[in-house]
Image: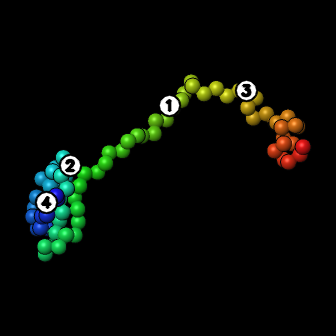
Amino acid sequence: MAETVNIYVAKTQLSRLVDRAREGEEIVIARNGRPVARLCALVPETSRITFGRLKGAVHLAADFDAPLPAEVLGSFEGEA
């Protein structure tokens, strides 16, 4: 169960409370005995974008942007 801390105590001990939350503890911050916020650890990002990851692994033909043959282009345009 989460520990409930008064907002005054939370203001004076915020650094310690953040350290406890980082370690996995959940702390509820209350004002006048009523819970108003929850302090908990953030879930770390699982992956980051790495530019150039596929460099050398992908090959494009020299004519990749050449016009399509008439029979292939016709099938895209609904011709039989």
Which residue is rendered at x = 9% and y = 64% of the image? Answer: 9
Q: Is residue 52 left or right of residue 71?
A: left
Mark 4 / mark 1, whichever is N-terminal: 4
Which residue is rendered at x = 16% and y = 49% of the image? Answer: 19
To which residue does mark 2 refer?
24
Mark 2 / mark 1, whichever is N-terminal: 2
- SS class of the residue under badge 3? loop
Mark-to-mark CA distance, 4 and 3: 65 Å
Mark-to-mark CA distance, 4 and 2: 12 Å
Q: Quadrant of residue 71?
A: top right
Which residue is rendered at x = 17% and y = 73% of the image? Answer: 34
Label 2 close to label 3 by CB (< 8 Å): no
Quadrant in which the C terminus is drawn: top right
Callout 2, which amino acid?
Gly
Q: Which mark is residue 3?
A: 4
Q: Which mark is residue 61?
A: none
Q: Which mark is residue 62?
A: 3
Mark-to-mark CA distance, 2 and 1: 34 Å
Indicate which label's residue lies in the foreground, 2 or 3: 2
Mark-to-mark CA distance, 3 and 1: 22 Å
Indicate which label's residue lies in the foreground, 4 or 1: 4
